[in-house]
Amino acid sequence: MITSHTETAVITETLENYFRSICEGDVNTLAKYFHKGTLLWGDVKGQPYARTLDQYLDGVENRLSPKDSGQPFLWNILSIDIINSIAMVKVHVKMYDFNYDEFLSFHKINNNWIIVSKMISDVQQ
């Protein structure tokens, strides 16, 4: 595995901006962190979850943002693995009454790290 501290720092900064956009419900900025063909998969409270990027962004846009709700929105990077132009990031997210583990697949396209797949699972804490 080839990991560069510089690339890890860039992905970390991307994640900070990505999660800020989620917290604020800023879908215009949030969309910039995804490849247009990204699909989102997983389970939420034991139920299957499958969304296109447009469906996901519509959901973010039409819900009360964590920032406006006053509810906690916490996230913590658990791991970042980089091999050349791909990366897999595992993150834990606490939002509303959910505790998610997320796997975000990144690909470096035109010198930018872009999310190409998002998988989530609601976990016990």
Image (cartoon, rainbow, N blue to C red):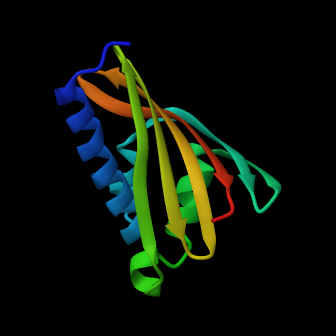
Q: Is residue 85 above or below residue 55?
A: above
Figure check: 33 above or below 45: above
Lateral position of residue 65 relative to residue 62, left or right: left
What is the x, y in percent for residue 80?
39, 34
Q: Residue furthest right?
A: 47
Q: Residue furthest left?
A: 6
Q: Could you say which is closer to the camera, residue 49 or residue 62?
A: 49
Q: Is residue 25 visible?
A: no
Let me know if residue 99 appears in the view: yes
Image-based side of 118 in relation to 34, left or right? right
Question: Which image quadrant is residue 25 in?
Answer: bottom left
Give the number of callouts: 0
Residue 3 in the figure: left or right of residue 23: left
The residue closer to the viewer here, 7 or 112, is: 7
Q: Quadrant of the C terminus?
A: bottom right
Residue at 82% over, 57% down: 46
Residue 82 or residue 51, whichever sits in front: 82
| Image position, residue 86 (x, y; %) | 41, 20
Residue shown at 28%/53% (left/top)? 17
Above or below for 70 versus 77: below
Residue at horizontal 38 percent and vertical 13 percent from the top: 1
Residue lying farthest to the bottom in this orientation: 70
Image quarter of residue 99: bottom right
Residue 91 place in picture, x, y as percent = 47, 48
Q: Residue furthest front?
A: 125
Residue at the spot x=29%, y=53% of the render? Answer: 16
